[in-house]
Amino acid sequence: MAERYFSADFHFNSTCQIKEKYRPFRSVESMNKTIIHNCNQVFDNNPKNGGNVLIHLGDFIQRGNDREYKGVKVNPCEFINQLHAQFVNIEGNHDNNNKVVSAGDLMYTQIGEFYVSMGHLPSYLHPNVERLQHIHLCGHVHNEWRQYYGGDGRHHYDKEHNIHNFNVGIDVWGFAPVSEGKLLNYIRKVLKYHR
């Protein structure tokens, strides 16, 4: 059986993400290389023979413009083909014109005993909040929850909608995807103390 991994907000080729989100890289090339390396290190340590599936919750690659990495043609396959995993993308706000094929903007799955929704935006920004599960995996926020609420930046409880948002973005998981098992343990830990 394949091992599933979750992540978001790779933003390959984005100088803006380095500057605005305070990513610890000196260049786009360094960021791109580190993300690919960290992903494959996680995937290659998987002892299962069924392969790996990366479910990426949006904003895979930046399309170049004056604020971005000038002169680079957007070709997401150059990055996807370097990953040692099957790739599924859920559309993010930067994926509408970057040639990444997305499976949709919202998906559902089961992780352990929990039914979860998955989308790029957290519940409080999601246009279809009524379609979300009590547990929602997202990206988009990078490390903002850490800055605004403290903690590790991986969880935010949306009191208004009674939804636990779990940030799977690489900015709060060491610039690597998180395995389903590790994410399940984290969800259980948060819900145990958040009753």
Image: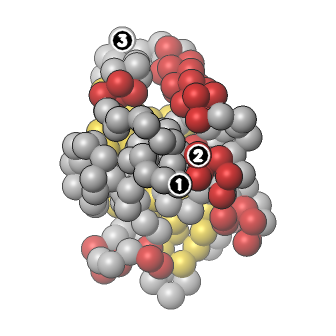
Q: Is residue 109 left or right of residue 168?
A: left
| Callout 3 amino acid | Asn
**Image vertical order of residue 7 relative to residue 19, above or below:** above
Element at label 3: loop
| Callout 2 amino acid | Thr
- Which mark sits nearer the N-terminus, 3 or 2? 2
Residue at point 44%, 77% (across, down)? 125
Element at label 1: loop
- Is residue 147 in view from this perspective? yes
Badge 3: few (under 14), some or many (20 or more) residues near its Cα, within 10 Å?
few
**Quarter of the image holding residue 80?**
top left
Location of residue 155 in the rendering, given as x and y in whole percent from the top left corner: 61, 62
Q: Are marks 2 and 1 in contact (CB under 8 Å)?
A: yes
Q: Nearer the viewer, residue 186 or 64?
A: 64
Q: Are marks 1 and 3 in contact (CB under 8 Å)?
A: no
Q: Is residue 70 left or right of residue 29?
A: left
Location of residue 177 in the rendering, given as x and y in whole percent from the top left corner: 52, 36
Badge 2: few (under 14), some or many (20 or more) residues near its Cα, within 10 Å?
many
Q: Nearer the viewer, residue 47 or 71?
A: 71
Q: Nearer the viewer, mark 1 or mark 3?
A: 1
Q: Is residue 194 left or right of residue 159?
A: right
Location of residue 39 in the rendering, given as x and y in whole percent from the top left corner: 52, 27
Q: Nearer the viewer, mark 2 or mark 1?
A: 1
Q: Are marks 3 and 2 in contact (CB under 8 Å)?
A: no
Q: Marks 3 and 2, Cα distance to the nearest angstrom?
A: 37 Å
Q: Which mark is residue 67?
A: 1
Residue, far bottom: 160
- Which residue is identified by label 2? 15
| Callout 1 amino acid | Arg
- Which residue is identified by label 3? 49
